[in-house]
């Protein structure tokens, strides 16, 4: 009887049995195809298939994937011993371990032994490596083996709550890595993250969510190949980093940081979609502090599509009171939030968007017409805007706001009204 999964409904099983005249077509598939099927399952599910028939009894041990959850090992079943046995059988058969996924709690095991095992995984030519260390912020983190810095086969690296030691004199080279996702990661040295990025010549996707107690002074992203970058700081308000971006192939970028020391964008892709949610805590009587915001705005002015938060708009509005804003002549689409903010922070920024075609406004309170008249929408926007979406609460003032734009936007062809 052919079976499509361990959870196949009884009616479906009967249909398969009658169609196949009782023959187990699935088990007759070549070994490499069956192993490919099992590689789509977790290791726990893969092991369960061994009860199907003698043909399946040892197939799970030939799969090039280990996908483990420490919670599945209780009592006399030791996860470390299981990994050792699996790795040893693979080594004897000359098989590669292509994917290693581990849901782990470092407090459950001896840390040094775990790192030793992880070193063996790296040296077995792993392609996809995921370590999810499920601990609280103030608990132990898993340290990565130094062999990880020179894993030629690695393509995808996903890490939660780990530590990267400084490589020292060890050569760092990750020639095949295309994706790196770091969340709750500590870097033991200010240059470690930059070194990792620069060692990945084909890197396409990068996410960095530093550990709240990580004290990187600089987050510098320089990559010719990078297409997607996301930075989300969960660090405490003190000791925030300088952020620098130089990635001319970037197609998507999202930066959410409470108060970066500075944010300088040298190059990104000409049509990149950008989301910015930052604020600057600067003293506007200090020229060097003003320069930090100026450098940020110069980088921002080259963007084509921009999503911007209320607190960033507030920072830009404060800057505009002491220095003129640069022109945002390339900006085609703007998604602006005024949630927990006021209408008056928006017009100064819009006044520099002389070629804006599409505008999405999200408001938690519909401004009264008196507010709009005191801080009117600049004429350049009213004459260029083709599309407008208003995400606002449903109040009587909502229709007044929509009417205002409909009457004053001479190029407007489409307007959408939606709730928040």
Image (cartoon, grey):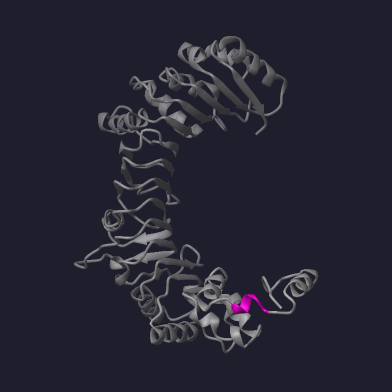
Residue at x 47% of width, y 86% of height: 81
Q: Is residue 242 above or below residue 201?
A: above
Q: How many marks?
A: 0
Residue 123 percent across, percent down from the top left: 33, 75
Q: Give how far across and how far down residue 40 sits, in percent.
A: 55, 68
The residue at the far left in this view is 169
Residue sitting at 38 percent across and 61 percent down?
155
Q: Residue at x 51, y 82 (%)?
A: 61
Near-viewer residue (51 or 103): 51
Q: Is residue 27 magenta?
A: yes
Q: Quadrant of residue 269?
A: top left
**206 horizontally vs 190: left or right:** right
Please tell me whether residue 272 is drawn above or below residue 88 in the rendered image: above
In the displayed structure, would residue 379 be above or below residue 337? above
* Magenta stretch: includes residue 18: no
Q: Which residues are magenta?
A: 24-28
Q: Is residue 400 left or right of residue 62?
A: right
The image quadrant of residue 394 is: top right
Whole-percent x and y of residue 74?
Answer: 59, 83
User: Is 74 displayed left or right of 199 in the figure?
Assistant: right
Measuring from the top left, give residue 340's x and y in whole percent. Answer: 57, 32
Quadrant where the N terminus sits is bottom right
Pick the quarter of the image with the C terminus. top right
Residue furthest to the front: 21
107 left or right, relative to 123: right
Q: Nearer the viewer, residue 81 or 250?
A: 250
Query: Mostly what secondary structure, the magenta segment?
Result: helix
């Amino acid at each position: 009887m052919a079976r499509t999964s361990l959870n196949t409904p009884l009616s479906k099983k009967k249909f398969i049995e009658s169609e196949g005249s009782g023959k187990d077509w699935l088990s007759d598939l070549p070994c490499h195809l069956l192993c490919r099927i099992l590689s789509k399952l977790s290791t726990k599910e893969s092991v369960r298939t061994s009860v199907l028939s003698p043909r399946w009894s040892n197939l799970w041990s030939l799969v090039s994937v280990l996908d483990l959850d420490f919670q599945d090992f209780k009592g006399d079943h030791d996860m470390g011993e299981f990994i050792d046995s699996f790795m040893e059988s693979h080594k004897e058969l000359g098989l590669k371990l292509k994917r290693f996924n581990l849901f782990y709690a470092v407090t459950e095991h001896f840390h040094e032994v775990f790192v030793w095992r992880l070193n063996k995984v790296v040296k077995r030519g792993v392609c996809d490596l995921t370590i999810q260390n499920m601990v609280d912020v103030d608990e132990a983190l898993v340290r990565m083996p130094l062999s990880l810095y020179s894993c030629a086969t690695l393509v995808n690296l996903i890490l939660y709550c780990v530590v990267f030691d400084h490589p020292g004199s060890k050569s760092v080279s990750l020639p095949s890595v295309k994706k790196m996702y770091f969340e709750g990661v500590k870097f033991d040295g200010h240059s470690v993250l930059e070194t990792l990025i620069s060692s990945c010549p084909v890197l396409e996707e990068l996410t960095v969510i530093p550990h709240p107690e990580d004290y990187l002074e600089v987050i510098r992203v320089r990559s010719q190949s990078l297409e997607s970058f996301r930075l989300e700081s969960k660090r405490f308000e003190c000791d925030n980093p300088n952020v620098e971006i130089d990635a001319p192939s970037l197609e998507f970028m999202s930066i959410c940081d409470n108060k970066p020391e500075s944010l300088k964008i040298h190059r990104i892709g000409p049509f990149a979609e950008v989301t910015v949610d930052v604020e600057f805590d600067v003293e506007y009587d200090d020229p060097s502090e003003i320069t930090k915001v100026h450098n940020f705005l110069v980088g921002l002015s080259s963007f084509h599509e921009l999503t911007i938060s209320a607190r960033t708009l507030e920072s830009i509005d404060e800057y505009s009171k002491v220095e003129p804003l640069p022109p945002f002549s390339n900006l085609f689409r703007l998604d602006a939030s005024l949630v927990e903010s006021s209408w008056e922070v928006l017009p100064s920024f819009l006044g520099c968007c002389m070629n804006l075609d599409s505008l999405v406004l999200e408001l938690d309170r519909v401004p009264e017409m008196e507010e709009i008249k005191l801080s009117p929408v600049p004429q350049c926007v009213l004459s260029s805007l083709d599309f407008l979406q208003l995400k606002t609460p449903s109040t009587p003032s909502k229709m007044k706001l929509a009417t205002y734009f409909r009457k004053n936007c001479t190029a407007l062809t489409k307007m959408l009204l939606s709730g928040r």
